[in-house]
Amino acid sequence: MAKFEFGFEESWLRLIIKKLPNHPNLFLPSAVEEAQGILRIGKLKVGAAKVWAESAGIITKKKNQFMLTTLGHLIRKHDPDMDDDGIWWAIHYNLAKQSSPAWFYSFYFNEFTNDIFDRKSLEDELRAWWNKDHEKPMTDSTFDKLIFSPLIQVFEGTRLGKDLGFFQPQEKNNFCRQSIGYKLPPAAIVAYSLLDWAIEQQRKSVHLEKLLEPWGVGRIFRLDRTSLDEILIQIGDYYNKQVGWVSHTAGLNSVSIMDLNPLILISAYYHELDGDSPEVALEKGKSEILELEKMQTTPTLFS
């Protein structure tokens, strides 16, 4: 299990996006001092930066070197400073989905339902959930150092906390998150997540309500049924049913999901920001992902 000894800050991911292509040894133990200088962080935080970047889906290790994933290359090309909120919604999805190595982050969004809470209530529920699948109870040190502190640091160090409404300290050692539906993610990012969810779940269709259950796209994005339905309708309309759509025929509320590379929708999202219509952006996304995947084996492409 990956060790999350710290949370992460936005600046860490920005520097990784910009610097990793020219420093493929960045996260090897032998290069830790170099990594400290490039990322401007301490030795232990270098390891945390690596596991969070891997969990976010922006870096991967191949043949004893680290490289940007296709998602990482898309960000580097279109928004290397990671200024746009949309990509943070996508990173949030990657951290919160069922297969995420950042399991405690995923738990917070899928199994923990309180919007106003204190540390003890979060700890009690998380420990109970942990104990279902582990013979040994979680130690106090594990919760303090590898779960609670990193989780708080992520929300304090990125817009995922206050800006997106996922976490905010209150008085008397309480915490809160904004109510469901406080902010809505872009349709293209929901489409990306829906396609990814369908691949992981091996599904081509799903009942809308299923997406509101733990580890469903609606739950992860903190959408209510109405908002989720409206976004799914938008996805069907925007992309002319080439990505997915919801059918309300006979009250079935069935969501059909096409067999499409999810990253096409990240590319499409950036092209929509540049002013392209969703259908044009989708076609550009298909071409861009095809080109990136062809070139992934060329080491000098992104240097």
Image: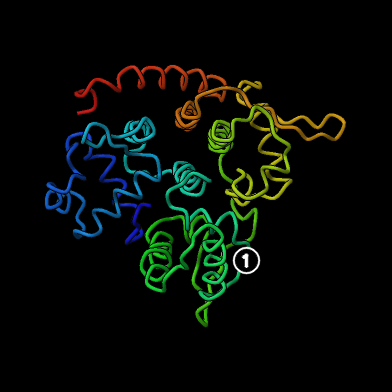
Point out residue 159 in the picture as x, y percentages from the top left corner.
44, 55
Residues packed near mark 1 inside 10 Å, few (<14), some (14 to 19) or many (20 plus): some
Q: Residue at x 23, y 39 (%)?
A: 20
Query: Relative to residue 296, is residue 181 depicted above or below?
Result: below
Which image quarter: residue 158?
Answer: bottom left
Q: Residue at x 38, y 52 (%)?
A: 1
Point out residue 177 in the picture as x, y percentages from the top left corner.
56, 64
In the image, what residue type sits under mark 1?
Asn
Point out residue 118 in the picture as x, y percentages from the top left corner.
54, 75
What residue would you read off at disc 1? 114
158 left or right, relative to 116: left
Residue farthest bottom in this picture: 172
Query: Relative to residue 72, is residue 145 depicted above or below?
Result: below
Q: Residue at x 52, y 67 (%)?
A: 127
Which image quarter: residue 156?
Answer: bottom left
Q: Nearer the viewer, residue 124 or 36?
A: 124
Q: Residue at x 55, y 31 (%)?
A: 199
Residue farthest front in this picture: 135
Disc 1 secondary structure class: loop
Point out residue 100 in the picture as x, y percentages from the top left corner.
46, 46
Query: Relative to residue 173, is residue 28 depicted above or below?
Result: above
27 left or right, relative to 78: left
Specify the quadrant that holds the C terminus: top left
Query: Relative to residue 213, is residue 177 depicted above or below?
Result: below
Residue farthest right in this picture: 250
Rendering colour mode: rainbow
Total tally of numbered discs in the picture: 1
